[in-house]
Structure formats: structure tokens, C-alpha cells
Image (tube, rainbow, N blue to C red):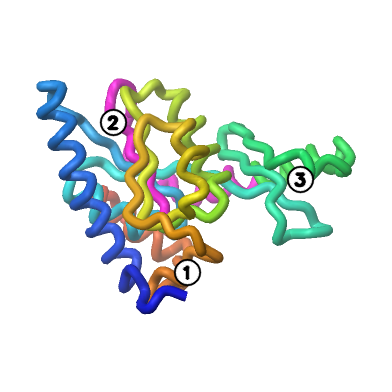
Amino acid sequence: MPSAPLFSDRTHAGEELAQALLTQIAALEMTTGETVSPMVYALPRGGIPVAVPIARQLNSPLDIVVAKKITTPQNPELAIGAVTSDGQVLWAQQRLWGRLKETLRQTALRHAQDKAQAQLAEFAPGCPQVNPQGKLAILVDDGIATGMTIIAATQTLKEYHPHQIWICTPVAPGGLIKRLGRFCDRLVILETPDNFLSVSRFYEEFPQVNTDEALAYLQEYNHLPYQQ
């Protein structure tokens, strides 16, 4: 166990991550001589309160990408893949689902995508109508444990042809760095411990973020009226 949590809560983690991003974006602008136009995307629900201070510091719109783990009723704790609301799919290693019948695998996939589409609809009132084409898409979560959902989310963003995609998170296992790097243009991760176990252990306070709370974050930041 770490001697003390790395972050007091998600807002604190987002503020620390925002400072790192400001430094890296400034360096990129100095290198290229071009102004970077960032757009921040959060994975709901926990990624939203981390993303708010980042979007504020970068003076960026704040949107979401929804991705859900694909699981089976027989073992709901084991993720055999991830899918986004628009159908981008990432399967885990075949040994995790190799014995699963194709019909059951497709059923699990549809169930997860239905959940992703339902969540996207819940958050739609807080999402701005923006297009990341040609911009820097910054994809944020409160931590990365397996990487499946955030990797699937990068595939959704690529459909909109941003100039670059950066995966940004306060904490992720050191062993994931190489794999994550294959799916984005840059990783911005504050801490990469090898002895990981779970995201929550690196936060002093890590409560569940409910839908109403997360939607309120989005609507308040994007100056959109609250609708329930």
C-alpha cells in the first residue's frame, strides 16, 4: 500500500493533471509554432469531475465518450472486452472468452452497447455540440486499471479525425504504458505504480459519482440548463 493516497479527491487529481497538460501543450506550441486548440473528453461517470478542472484551465469545451465493459452473467466481474456507444469494440485476450459461444458473446456485446447508448442519452443534455476534427482531443478518466474502456474510446474519437489524441489520467499501472501508447499520440499520466490493484487506493476520497451529479458537472461547466 502507498504510505498516503496520491490525490485527495478527483478534483485535486484533475487540477494536478491540468498543470501537467498546460506545460506539455505550451512546449508543443513552442516546438511547432502553432496554437493548439484542445477539446476535453471525459469517460463517465468518474472521469467527469477530473476533467472539469482540466477543461477550465485549457478553456476548452467538455464532452464525453461512453464506453462500457463487456461482461457475461456467469462472471459479471470479468471483462471480456469493451464497447462504445457507437459500436467501437475491443476484445480482451481470447483466453478470457475463447470458450464462450459466439451467440453468447454477441449477446454480451449488445447488452454492453445498449448500456453505453443509454448512458450517452442520459448525459446528452450536458454535452456541447462540438466537433474535434483537426483539434487536440484530450481523453480523461479518473484512473486506468485494464485500459479496455479508454482504448475503445480512442477508436470513437478517431472517427472524428482530431489532429491528435492524448490519453490523460492521474494514475495507471506501469505495465500498461506500452499498450496504451499504441492507441494515442501521447500519454499524460501523473503516476504509474507497478503494484496497482485498484484505482481507488490512490485517492483519499473516491465516492461513486452518480448520474445526476455527473450531469450537473457537465451542464454547469458548459453553461447548459439543467434538465432531469
Foreground tag (1 vs 2): 1
Q: CA distance from mark 2 to mark 3?
A: 33 Å
Which residue is found at the position 88% from the left and 43% from the top? Answer: 99
For disc 2, the marked residue is 136
Residue 126 showing in the rendered view:
no
Please tell me whether mark 2 sits on a helix, a strand or a loop: strand
Q: Is residue 115 magenta?
A: yes
Q: Residues within 10 Å of mark 3 (few under 14, many from 20)?
A: some
Amino acid type for the residue under numbered disc 2: Leu
Quarter where residue 207 is shown: bottom left
Q: Which residues are magenta?
A: 114-141
Please tell me which of labels 3 and 1 falls first in the chain.
3
Residue 108 marker: 3
Please tell me whether mark 1 sits on a helix, a strand or a loop: helix
Amino acid type for the residue under numbered disc 3: Ala
Q: CA distance from mark 3 to mark 1?
A: 27 Å
Residue 144 is left or right of residue 72, and the answer is left
Amino acid type for the residue under numbered disc 1: Ser
Q: Quadrant of the C terminus?
A: bottom left
Residue 200 marker: 1
Position above or below: 40 against 132: below
- Which x, y percent locates residue 80? 71, 46
Position above or below: 117 against 53: above
Which residue is found at the position 17% from the left and 49% from the top? Answer: 57
Residue 19 is left or right of residue 109, and the answer is left
